[in-house]
Amino acid sequence: MSDKILIVDDEPEIADLIELYLKNEDFTVYKFCTAKEALDCAQNTDIDLAVLDIMLPDISGYTLCRKIRERSSCPIIMLTAKDGEADKITGLTLGADDYVTKPFRPLELAARVKAQLRRYKKYNSPRKESDSDNTLSYLDIELNTKTHDCTLAGTPLALTPTEFSILEILLRQKGSVVSAEDLFREIWKDEYYTKNNTITVHVRHLREKLNDSVENPKYIKTVWGVGYKIEKQK
């Protein structure tokens, strides 16, 4: 059964173009021009991924993103005509996993859709009981890659799939600096990397949940101009 993709854009030519490329990749596409129609679909269909335009005629793509996220953990990609960091950060804060700025290359969007679905399925797939490295820990952080649970001093943390993946990568490479580009490529398995703040925003949210500080980090250290690292325990 093919993955079900929800597309919402009030510009029919853009929605049609996205639909064409995704159908060529054998996805099932649900296409709408208003947020209300899209929300009705999301509430009655188990969609696998959503592509949401920010500027919609009834309610904003931000509100739609938040409402979808209330009932589903599926990947969400925001489409924005603005290149402002505030718009991108707002979408990521509300639960979006990625954003694409208009005008965009349809092949790049299709690649991002496939990358998000690969990551989501990997995150949600059961692991074999024989895995010997299910648990990663550092100080009072404990992360279980089998159950996808994370605790801080015994308290469960609600991490998004992207936040979980970033923390897992940094824990596995303790003592080494991991660049934003390497994090992006490892998480999304995507060659379409551009220098933007996607990883920065996700790391910021992860730090907030860990009660970590940029100036005096306990867990995630920023190596300016290089990337991020978690120190090896002495």
Image (cartoon, grey):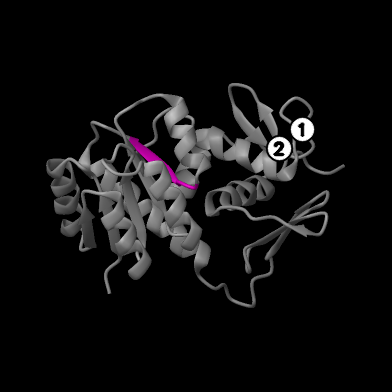
Image x and y of residue 4, in percent? 29, 64
Query: Does residue 96 belong to the magenta stretch?
Result: yes
Is the residue marked by circle 1 packed among few (<14), some (14-19), or many (20+) residues within 10 Å? few
The amino acid marked with disc number 2 is: Ile
Q: Which mark is residue 159?
A: none
Looking at the image, which residue is at 64% across and 34% down? Answer: 228
Which residue is tagged 2?
220
Query: In which image quadrant can residue 226 be found?
Result: top right
Instruction: Write the residue at 53% across / 49% down.
Output: 162
- Does the residue at mark 2 contact the one at mark 1 (Cβ under 8 Å)? yes
Which residue lies most toward the bottom here?
A: 129
Q: Please say whether residue 189 is visible from this viewpoint.
A: no
Q: What range is drawn magenta here? A: 95-100
Q: Of 170 and 200, which appears nearest the observer?
A: 200
Q: Position of residue 198 (x, y in %)?
A: 48, 35
Q: Secondary structure at mark 1?
A: loop
Residue at image location 63% in from the left, 22% down from the top: 224
Q: Which image quadrant is residue 229 in?
A: top right
Residue situated furthest front in the rendering: 58
Q: Quadrant of the C terminus?
A: top right
Instruction: Inspect this view and state whether residue 161 appears.
Output: yes
Give the percent coordinates (x, y) of residue 201: 55, 35
SS at badge 2: loop
Q: CA distance from mark 2 to mark 1?
A: 6 Å
Q: Nearer the viewer, residue 55 or 231?
A: 55
Q: Residue at x 29, y 30 (%)?
A: 81
Quarter of the image for residue 14 reads top left
User: Label 2 neighbourhood size at 10 Å, few (<14), some (14-19), many (20+)?
Assistant: many
Residue 119's spot in the image, x, y percent?
45, 56
Instruction: Name the amino acid type tagged 1.
Output: Pro
The residue indicated by pointer 1 is 217
